[in-house]
Image: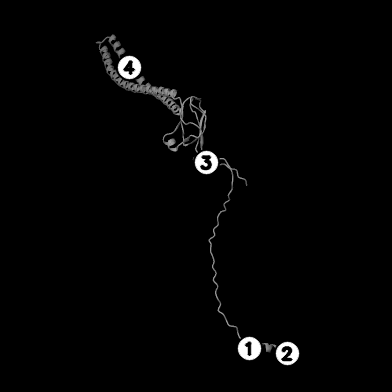
Amino acid sequence: SSTLLVAGFSGFAFLASLRSKPPSREEQKRVYQVDLYRVEAQPLQQVMTAFGTARSDHQVVLAAQVAGEIVSVHPELKVGLRIPPQQSEANPVVLVEIDPQAFQQKVTQAERRLDEDQAELARHAQDAKNNAVLLEKARTDLAEYRKEYERVRGLKAKGVATESDVTKATLELRRYDDQVIVLENRKRLLPLEEQKLLKRRAVHQADLALVQLELEHATVKAPFSGVLGDVHVEQGQYVRPGDALVRLVDDSRIEIPIFLTA
């Protein structure tokens, strides 16, 4: 049996050697078209829908700062009146005018008091100059008469002058001396009087500034451009400090508060 197997393999090998080789083919290269894209990481934007009420983030309620009767209002003073930017900045719009007569009278009185203070300070300065001149002359006269007094005493010692002459000379010397003392005391008092006048003038200056501010507050102007949201007054109405006049809304920037759920 082993002889048959060897013979079989030998025959198969012989037949395989007689078989011709298949023709060879050149290998072809395949070309593929590929699209390239650049990919970058981007944050994911989530769109949410919500509802809210639009409102201005800047609005003010203009209130009266002085008491008085409203004598005039803007001819179109009503809700919705628009204040243009060019008017509110260059020439503010007058919304309400409170009777300024009483405040003008206060200003006039305060100015008159200041004029009186200034005139009194000028008189005081002249008084100080006059006192200085008189004091210098009084000191000179005292020095001159002291020589005369010593001369009379010398004559008395020589028996030429009498006791009455010495007494008269003594009284006259005291008169000159008293005059110098009075003027020196006046000189010491002058700075104190000046300080008193300056303090009084400072008080009157503060009073004038206060009444001028009240007069300015009698005219209520729009502080910025916008729209009137509320109007609380009318012409002829009497107002007190703190009373609301109008509400001015700056609608150049609007915010909308909304509530979001997680």
Between marks 1 and 3, how big is the CA–CA gap? Answer: 99 Å
Badge 3 amino acid: Ile
Q: Is residue 213 above or below residue 47?
A: above
Q: Earlier in the sequence, mark 2 or mark 1?
A: 2
Q: Amino acid at mark 4?
A: Gln
Q: Residue furthest left?
A: 160
Position in image of residue 138 (x %, y %): 30, 19
Judged from the image, the secondary structure of the residue bearing numbered disc 1 is helix
User: How many angstroms separate mark 1 from mark 4 (CA)?
Assistant: 168 Å
Q: Residue 4: which numbered mark, if any?
A: 2
How many residues crowd around disc 3 within 10 Å: few (fewer than 14), some, or many (20 or more)? few
Q: In which quadrant of the rendered image does the N terminus lie?
A: bottom right
x%, y% of residue 144? 27, 18
Look at mark 4 in the image and give the residue it sits on. 179
Give the residue drawn at x 44%, y 38%. Answer: 85
Instruction: Please name the amino acid that badge 1 sits on.
Output: Leu
